[in-house]
Amino acid sequence: MEYLKETQGIVALSCFAIMLYLLARRPHDPRLRSVTGLVAGWAIGHPFGRAAADGRWFLGLDPMVSQLIQHVMLQIGVYGLICFFVFSALDDTRARRQALIQLTPLVLGISAMTWAVVAIPGDLRVAAALVPHSLGGGPTGVLAITVFYGVGNGYLLYGFAAMFVWARRYARGAEPRLRRGLLITSTGLGLLVPADAIFVASNVSRYFGEPLPRWLLTTAVWFLLPGVLSCCLGVVYPIAAMRLSAMRLWLRHLRAYHRLAPLWTLLHQSFPEDALHRVPSKRDAFSLRGVHRRYYRRVIECRDGLVRISPYVAEAPEQLPLADRLRAGLETRRSGAVTLRRPIALAVPDGDGLDADVRELEKLAVALR
């Protein structure tokens, strides 16, 4: 368990450092600022939450103050995620107005929690930070503890419900890949809302001395775990799908690059001056952009070479396969003969677009092997 906690802290701080780097490059992007606020809340609140859960002092602060800082940072993170959905679904002017409106419950919640922490008596502060099921003490202390955890869970309930609404609203106009991710996220949020509602009800019921049945709390946990997992999957899905699509395109270009080698080699030997002058760097071979660059370069050079050799190909008998006519044309040019024929179209694709053109070039290259 300690290993998992340490890993969580390292991951949180690493993500926070990455987000600060991205924010430094694009400081005026409201969506990036919102996500940075989410990660900051997670990262900064983590060590305070650990200290509070262990019931120990941290940086001169007692466990209950650490619990307050951890909850405040968690709520700021939830507010950042709300702002991300708001700025994604609305134009900037309306989004800023909505972000200010969403700031009101956050400020009210933090104010109530701060009052509650101040009101908790000294003899209950360590026990209250450990979140026990029942506490002794005077009515003021018990009320303060109830307010602290009830308001903390209540804001999470409000935040998850608001994000559920915004995710559903934004999904209507999003492109398919993002829409699927938002629907997965909203499904997770739909599970987190009843889970947090049960936690709030549990906080209130403890104040009146009638704790909720244990099976109901178990149900909340069963809602909580798949809800968090679905939210994470929904956030990751558009990025993963985009990367997978980019990888498929990279593999397709790499295969086409190698398939065109026989055609390109023959044409390059006859027209070396048509080679594009930009020489790829060594790291191009290991980069995504490098493969795409070499692919487009080879396609262009093949087309240029076919245009140059086409007058000689036109002199070969038309009943021969194009590969044989191309070899005959190259041999004729290599012999030093001069042709008066005009250039003709070779390997004409049966459709529009670069992909159709490359398919025809690949067929010719395969025939030349």
Image (cartoon, rainbow, N blue to C red):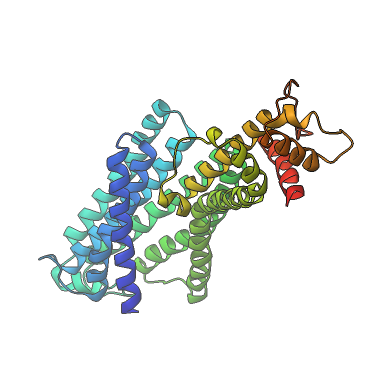
Q: Residue furthest right?
A: 319
Left or right of 349: which side holds 242? left
Q: Residue furthest left?
A: 60
Quarter-of-image position of residue 297: top right
Closer to the camera, 27 or 293?
Answer: 293
Q: Is residue 131 visible?
A: no
Left or right of 341: which side holds 154? left
Q: Is residue 340 above or below residue 283?
A: above
Q: Position of residue 105 (x, y in %)?
A: 34, 43
Q: Position of residue 49 (x, y in %)?
A: 27, 66
Closer to the camera, 330 or 131?
Answer: 330
Split into 4 quadrants, where in the image is the N terminus? bottom left
Quarter-of-image position of residue 187: bottom right
Closer to the camera, 259 or 56?
Answer: 259
Q: Is residue 306 above or below residue 295?
A: above
Q: Position of residue 303 (x, y in %)?
A: 65, 33
Q: Residue at image x 30%, y 43%?
A: 23
Q: Position of residue 224 (x, y in %)?
A: 49, 65
Left or right of 107: which side holds 62? left
> How many numbered marks does the figure carry?
0
